[in-house]
Image (tube, grey):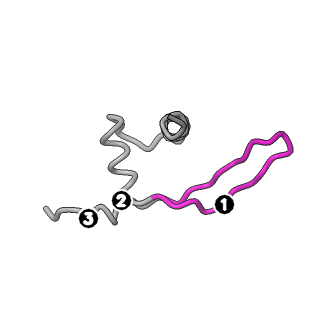
Amino acid sequence: MSQKNNEDISIKVSNVTHNEDGTADVEFEVTDEFIEWFKNKEGLKNWSQKRFQKFFNETVVKKIKTSGE
């Protein structure tokens, strides 16, 4: 089994749509390796867009809170 390089596990913002209410919709491109890493991390058999959105939102909120300290 070959070992994966961290560069193989990537996520890229492909589009951002700004909404009138001040929110934004963000679209991502992810590698197959990222999908496998995420499923493994979350204990999933299949990709879950809903779980990814929750994970992403929680991660961003934590980062914002810690960067302000």
C-alpha separation, residue under disc 1 versus residue under disc 2: 19 Å
33 horizontally vs 14: left or right? left
Please tell me how crowded label 1 is: few (under 14), some (14-19), or many (20+) other residues with Cα within 10 Å.
Answer: few
Label 2 element class? loop
* Farthest-out residue, right: 20
Does the magenta portion include 16? yes
The magenta segment: 11-29
Label 2 amino acid?
A: Ile
Query: Badge 2 is on which residue?
Result: 9
Q: Position of residue 66 (x, y in %)?
A: 48, 36
Q: Amino acid at mark 1?
A: Asn
Estimate the x, y position of residue 29 in percent, counting from the top left: 53, 60
The residue that mark 1 highlights is 15
Report the front residue among 32 and 11: 11
Q: Judge whether 5 appears above or below 35 on screen.
A: below
Position in image of residue 69 (x %, y %): 50, 34
Dot 1 falls on a residue whose secondary structure is strand
